[in-house]
Amino acid sequence: MADWGPVVIAVVLFLLLTPGLLFQLPGRNRVVEFGNMQTSPVSILVHTIIFFGLITIFLIAIGVHINTG
């Protein structure tokens, strides 16, 4: 049996937290900008920290598992 939980959680968080795709925190002109398709080094750092925190919570603290087979 394969455990697909970490793969699914990582892909979903990556898609949701790509800077500039859905939102950007901090934005260029505002604190939060939505769908601007631009990015900055500061927003990459902020989104990386958020990604690391959420993936740690979901995979280590909660222990999400999706088994196949």
Image: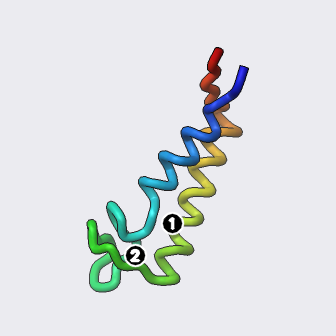
Q: Residue at x 63, y 19 (%)?
A: 68
Which mark, by number, is residue 30? none
**What's the residue type where badge 2 is placed?**
Pro
Q: Residues within 10 Å of mark 1 (few under 14, many from 20)?
A: many
Instruction: State whether residue 53 is above or below residue 36.
Output: above
Quarter occupied by the N terminus: top right
Q: Image quadrant of residue 20?
A: bottom left
* Above or below for 12 versus 45: above
Quadrant (top left/top right/bottom left/bottom right) for the C terminus = top right
Q: Secondary structure at mark 1?
A: helix
x and y, in percent, of residue 56 in the image = 66, 47
Q: What colouring style does the render use?
A: rainbow
Direction from residue 50 to residue 32 in the image, left or right? left
Q: Which is nearer the eye, 17 or 1?
A: 1
Mark 1 sits on what residue? Answer: 47
Question: Badge 2, how many Cα within 10 Å: few under 14, some, many 20+?
Answer: some
What residue type is disc 1 on? His
Residue plotted at (43% across, 69% down): 19
Q: Which element type, helix, strand or loop, lies under badge 2?
A: loop
Residue 64 in the image, given as x and y percentages of width and height = 62, 30
Marks 1 and 2, the one that precedes in the sequence: 2
User: Mark 2 = which residue?
Assistant: 26
Question: In the rendered image of this protein, does residue 57 appear above or below residue 18?
Answer: above
Query: In 3D space, how far apart are the residues under numbered discs 1 and 2 (Cα atoms)?
Result: 9 Å
Percent x, y of residue 38: 36, 78
